[in-house]
Amino acid sequence: MSKYKTKYACQECGYESPKWMGKCPGCNSWNTMVEEVAVKAAARHEGLHGGQRQTAIPLTEVASEEEPRMDTTIHELNRVLGGGLVPGSMVLVGGDPGIGKSTLLLQTSFALAHQGAKVLYVSGEESAKQIKLRADRLGMSTPPMYVLSENDLDAIEQHIAQIDPHVLIIDSIQTVFHPAVQSAAGSVAQVRETTSHLMRIAKGKGIATFIVGHVTKEGAIAGPRMLEHMVDAVLYFEGERHNTFRILRAVKNRFGSTNEIGIFEMKEKGLEEVGNPSEIFLAERPVGVAGSTVVASMEGTRPVLVELQALVAPTSFATPRRMATGVDHQRVAMIMAVLEKRVGLMLQNQDAYVNVAGGVRLDEPAVDLAVAVSIASSFRDHATNPHDVVIGEVGLTGEVRGVSRIEQRIREAHKLGFKRVIIPSKNIRGLDVPPDIEVIGVSNISEALREVLRG
C-alpha cells in the first residue's frame, strides 16, 4: 500500500510547508499550520472549458455585449450586484454567524423561483425539513425550487447535471468536501478544490452561483485568501446581532461598483429593504444635545445622512482615552490634534469617544469636519443647530478641503427638511441647489466652528 505524502498548510493564508512550524511565514499567524494529505497531480481536473483548448484571438474581434442580468426583485441586492445577477457568475457572501446570510439567500431563491428561474439550494448545515420550517416561519409561499441537504461535491454535481438549474446556492463552502482530497472539510485544500470545481461548473454551464463563506474572529472570510480572488464578487453582510439593521457591502465586483451598499432591516418575516436609510438613521436623533452632528456621506452612488456623536470628558488616567466606533480611530486622533493646535482647544487631558449612530461605517474623508464639530460641541458643552448638516475634509493645517458629489449630498439634506448645509468654500462655485436651503462655505476649521457653534 502506497504511503500518502503529507504537507502542512496555514488555515489563514494557505501557505504550505513540508514540516510543521509554530508561526506561519506567510501571514505571521501562530498555530495555524495543519497537516493535510497532498493532492496528487493526476487528480487535478480540466480547465474552465472542459479540457478543450482555446485559441487566442485579437481583442478587437471579441464581440462586446451587455451581460444579461437576472432581476432578483430585491432592489438593495440588485444595487450591490451592479444591476442584477449575471448568469455564470460566482458570488461569495460572508458574514458573522446569525447575521442573516442564509435568510437573505433563501429570500433571493424564492424571489428568483417565482419569476420562473430554476433554483437549487444546497445546504451542508441544515436538513431539507429545517429549510422548509425556516421558509414557513418567514411566510414564504412554496415556489418550484429544489432543496438538497448534501456536502459531497460529487453528489452535488450529479444533482446539478440532473436538474440543470439557473441559480445554484451553496450554504456553506466550508462544509462541502471533494472526495479526491484527503483532508477534512473546511481545510485550505478542500475549500480551494471545491471552489475551483464549482467555478468550472458555473462558467461552463452559465449557472449563477452563490457560495456562503464563514468568517474568522477578525471578520475576514475563513480559508485561503485566494478564495476571494477566484470569485467574481465578494459581498460582506455586516451589522450588530443586537441591532435590526444589516448592511450588505461589496468589496469586489467584476460586474459593477465596489462602493455600493444595500441596507436591510431584520424583522420577524425576514429581511426588509430600507428605501430611505437617512430617515431611519436620524429617527432617534436627540435635539439640543451637545456633541451631535449630522453628516452627509456617500455610499457608492447613494447619499446617506447619519448622526455623528461625540463625548468629551476629563480623564482620570495619565494617558487620555481615544475611542471611535464607525470611523477610523487614527483619523479621530489626527482631527483632535488639529483642534488643539489650530483652534486652541485643550484636549490633552480629555477622554474622547466618537460614535456613528445606526452601526454604519464611514470611511470617506468628507466626514472629518463633522467629527471636529461634534468634538468641539461636546468639549464646549454647546449644542449644534439641529437643522444643520456639516460636510468637509480637514487638513493638518486646519483648512477645509473640497469633497465630491456635493450637490447630491445637499439635495438629500433638503429632502429630509434641513435648513443649512456647511460645506467647503471650494465647492460653492457653480452650485445648483434648491432655493429654500442655505449653503455656507468655510475655508478653515475655525470658520466652521464659529458658524456652527456661533462662538
Image (cartoon, grey):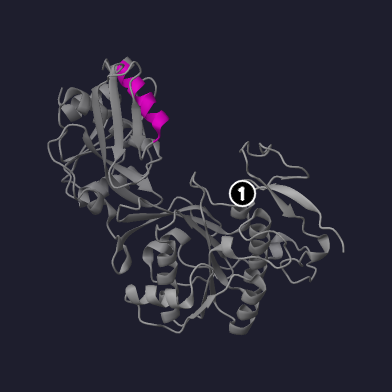
The answer to whether 438 appears left or right of 78 in the picture is left
Relative to 118, does residue 444 appear above or below in the rendering?
A: above
Q: Is residue 23 visible?
A: yes
The dominant secondary structure in magenta is: helix
Q: Is residue 126 magenta?
A: no
Which residue appears at 59% of the width and 53% of the height? 228
In terms of depth relative to the viewer, which is nearer, 406 or 216?
216
Name the quarter where the N terminus is drawn: bottom right
Relative to 191, does residue 290 appear above or below in the rendering?
A: above
Q: Amino acid at mark 1?
A: Arg
- Counting every numbered tag in the picture gives 1
Which residue appears at 40% of the width and 61% of the height? 100
Q: Is residue 428 visible?
A: no
Which residue appears at 64% of the width and 55% of the height? 187
Secondary structure found at label 1 = loop
Q: Is residue 332 magenta?
A: yes
Name the quarter where the C terminus is drawn: top left
- The picture places residue 3, in percent across and down from the top left corner, at 84, 58
- The picture places residue 234, in percent across and down from the top left corner, at 52, 56
Question: What residue is shown with label 1?
Answer: 225
In terms of depth relative to the viewer, which is nearer, 79 or 169?
169
Task: Tell me which segment is drawn in magenta.
Answer: 328-340
- The picture places residue 397, in percent across and down from the top left corner, at 37, 19
How many other residues sit within 10 Å of disc 1, few (<14), some (14-19) or many (≥20)? some
Relative to 143, does residue 334 appear above or below in the rendering?
A: above
Which residue appears at 61% of the width and 80% of the height? 159
